[in-house]
Image (tube, coloured by chain):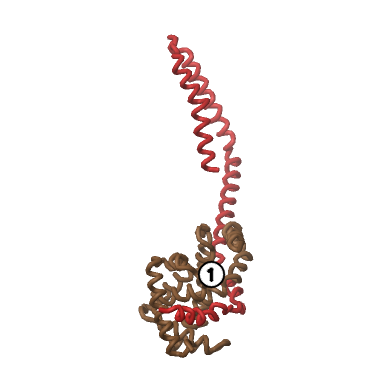
Amino acid sequence: MADLNDISLVTQVAVFHNKRAFDQLVRKYQSPVRRFFLNQTLGDEQLSDDLAQETFIKAYLNITKFKGMASFSTWLFRIAYNVHYDYMRSLHQTEDIDTSSALRTSSTSGNESLKMDLYKALSLLKPDERTCITLQLIDGHQVDKIAEITGIPANTVKSHLKRGKDKMAIYLKQNGYDR
Amino acid sequence: MTDKDNIMIEDFFKQAAQQQIEDNGFTERVMQNLPETVSKSRRLSHLWTLFCVALGVVIFFIFGGWEIVQLGWMGALRMVATSMEVFMQTAPTTEITLNLWVLLGLAAFVLVYLPYQTGRKLSSVL
């Protein structure tokens, strides 16, 4: 039903250039998309919002390319992943992003200690591991959906998840989460 | 990794999964930054096409385009009529023998095979 509603909104945007319909789509998906970027940038709110905005603008410009084969959410996450991938490539950065600057900017909203712990834990992961882990454990996507979003083969996704979870388990035990 | 580890990891990420980010003007910012170029250029393209068509129609009537079309049409009709007349006068008068089986085959092709193929293609499209 939700998918049908999305397709109806997408059709209105694609055929009639209905901006109100696109406004509804942005309002509906802003939270998961911005949260996805927050997790990839380890809590850099400003950067996350910029990347999320770029994602929605790209979605708007390419809305006619959405064929409805996958859900709109999967299609949007694929754009978000590509936007983040392009950003990382533009930085010529192959290692994890600068955690100190990211953690510094995340100190403005509530539930601080848990957020700090989450971003610290995520900073231990390689970018692909982080993407797979957050897409599964935070955004609730299945392995095949993660493969579709990232373009990584399903078996490689499983390997990233396994390695990522091993690292997370060690980190959580070291920080007393097993008690 | 044990089941206990899995539960611990899922618990750790559970709260993060429940986190909802307030809009706080994000949607408005996105909507304000949406490029207008797509629809604007399309609108300009439509207006330009409309202008060109209107200009073409006006020029067509001003320079007597209608008379030229009428003359051309009459000339073409006259040419066809003349060709038919010449053909009728010079056509061979020998009789053409018709094979019954060829006629039946042709009738079957038109009445059975063509409707069957058309129906099959239409049903696959619909």
Q: Is residue A128 among what the camera can see?
A: no
Q: Is residue B35 above or below residue B16?
A: above
Residue A138: image location, x then y, percent: 51, 76
Q: Position of residue B48 (x, y in %)?
A: 56, 54
Amino acid carrying label 1: it is Phe
Residue at image point 47% right, 80% down: B9
In the image, residue B96 above or below residue B59 = above
Chain assignment, label 1 = A
Residue for badge 1: A56
Residue depicted at 41% across the width and 74% down the height: A161
The quadrant where residue B77 appears: top right
Query: Taking A171 as reference, is A143 above or below it?
Result: above
Please indicate whether residue B38 sits to the left or right of residue A164 in the image.
Answer: right
User: Which of the chains is brown?
Assistant: A
Query: Which residue shows up at 59% across the image and 72% down it?
Result: B32
Q: Local crowd at mark 1 within 10 Å, few (<14), some, or many (≥20)?
A: many
Residue A102's x, y, as percent?
A: 46, 85
Is residue B3 found left or right of A21 in the rendered image? left
Colour chain B appears in: red
The answer to whether one can see residue A133 in this image is: yes
